[in-house]
Image (cartoon, rainbow, N blue to C red):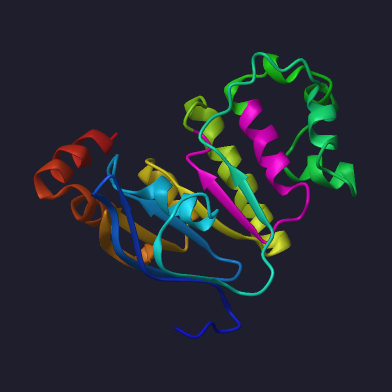
Amino acid sequence: SQIESNDMLIVNGLNVRSQNKTILEDVSFRVKKGTSLAIVGPNGGGKTTVFRTLLNTIRYTGMIKWNGEVRMGYVPQSLVSTDLPILVEEFLRLKCRTDFETCTKAVGLDKAILRQNLGSLSGGELQRVLIAWAIVDNPTVLLLDEPTSGVDVGAEEPIYEKVNDLKKELGITVLLISHNMHIVMHYSNYMLALNKRVLFFGETKSLTHSQLLSTIYGNEFALSEEEHYKE
């Protein structure tokens, strides 16, 4: 596949095997510049493995092609920070060589948070700091691996709002892994549903909530989930 100027990433025929087990099989997708792709699927379906191939930390076969020079920001699922005796500001300044205020304002970190110890932050505050850490050096691509898994329900949406704003303002291309279907439906342009193989790849708005659930989990599970989602 030739890379076009509006594509940021093309993945073709991606395979990952470990100890004779197939983890990913023949996975292909592409991501346009300045858009967001959500990767969804059951546990063990290979979502984080895709990120690890993009970060080039595991062996794979197939093609991963980026458009030119890529600067990548990465936000992991969680970071245990209780033993780090470092202020938030000191932590961020380790990486931010340029306009520090722009970095921190972008993700809504005020002076009160900056003066706190990294280990004393709440889940939501820590994730905002990790997103700030990921974007302080102006990445072109942001990988978010369930960045709100340890965050209170109310704090989750503002984090994605913030990421969405950054995508629009800075033209960052966002790839996110999430189990929260509401977040997926509202904050992604495209979706890749995975269970070792590609179950669905296309525009997020082309699937309803229940179609998405039945694509990932099968019809019976989706019906019971739909009931659960009704207020």
**In the image, what residue occupies the spot 53% across and 34% down?**
156
Question: For residue 225: magenta?
Answer: no
**In the image, what residue occupies the spot 72% across and 61% down?**
170
Quadrant position of residue 15: bottom left
Q: Position of residue 227 (x, y in %)?
A: 19, 37
* Image side of residue 176 versus residue 192, left or right: right
Q: Nearer the viewer, residue 17 or 134?
A: 17
Q: Nearer the viewer, residue 42 or 152?
A: 42
Above or below, 117 against 68 in this view is above
**In the image, what residue occupies the spot 90% across and 48% down?**
99
**In the image, what residue occupies the spot 61% across and 83% down?**
5
* Image side of residue 25 versus residue 112, left or right: left
Please identify the residue farthest to the left as the structure is shown: 220
Above or below, 123 against 103 in this view is above
Quadrant position of residue 180: top left
Question: For residue 133: magenta?
Answer: yes
Q: Which residues are magenta?
A: 125-148
Quadrant for the N terminus, please.
bottom left
Quadrant for the C terminus, please.
top left
* Image side of residue 144 versus residue 205, left or right: right
Q: Position of residue 107 (x, y in %)?
A: 72, 41
Q: Is any part of residue 31 visible from this angle?
A: no
